[in-house]
Amino acid sequence: MTGKTIKNIKSKKMNQTNIFDEPIDECCSNPITGFFRDGFCHTGKHDMGLHIVCSLITNDFLSFSKARGNDLSTPKPEFNFPGLKEGDSWCVCAERWKEAYEHGFAPKVFLRRTHKKASSIINIEILKEFAVDLN
């Protein structure tokens, strides 16, 4: 990538906001999360899964996701992925989170770390019901 391309990507990510239309906070850097693996639930045109809901991972959610074909708990060293465990924060795909909610397995969410686009997929009142950081 050229310097200009990198600058454009960084600029677009820096302008992304959370569901309160504020600058989005980092979700997690250990393990490193996000579609861009930058620690944030940023999104872009290549993020077909919309990895935008910063979630507090639970064992129930991990089991549910694995049963749906997305094993997030098994380490994959070839992708520098340590595997998730309960208590980790992770940028979950919005549709997967919604599906987990509909089946009773949705994890808690960090609203200030969740991309505003999530509220176009998941009812904002449901997100607030699961919020860890709502004052």
Image (cartoon, rainbow, N blue to C red):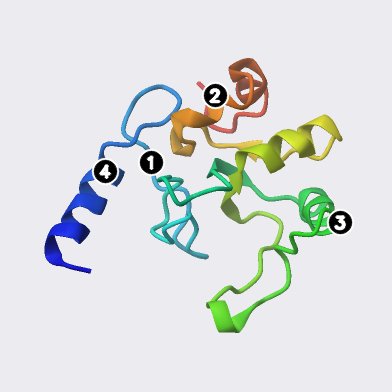
Residue at the far bottom in the pictured view: 78
On residue 12, the disc is 4
Left or right: residue 57 versus residue 11 is: right
Q: Earlier in the sequence, mark 3 or mark 2?
A: 3
Label 1's element? loop
Q: Earlier in the sequence, mark 4 or mark 3?
A: 4
Q: Residues within 10 Å of mark 2 (few under 14, many from 20)?
A: some
The quarter of the picture where residue 29 lies is bottom left
Residue type at mark 4? Lys
Q: Residues within 10 Å of mark 4 (few under 14, many from 20)?
A: few
Residue type at mark 3? Ala
Q: Residues within 10 Å of mark 3 (few under 14, many from 20)?
A: few
State the separation of the CA atoms marked 3 and 2. Answer: 25 Å
Decide which of 83, 135 is in the foreground and name it.
Answer: 83
Decide which of 86, 17 is in the foreground and name it.
Answer: 17
Identify the residue under disc 2: 119
Label 4's element? helix
Identify the residue under disc 1: 25
Identify the residue under disc 3: 67
Asked whether the beta carbons under mark 4 and mark 3 sit within 8 Å of each other, the answer is no
- Residue located at (60% from left, 27% from top): 121
Q: Is residue 115 above or below residue 124?
A: below
Q: Is residue 20 above or below residue 62?
A: above
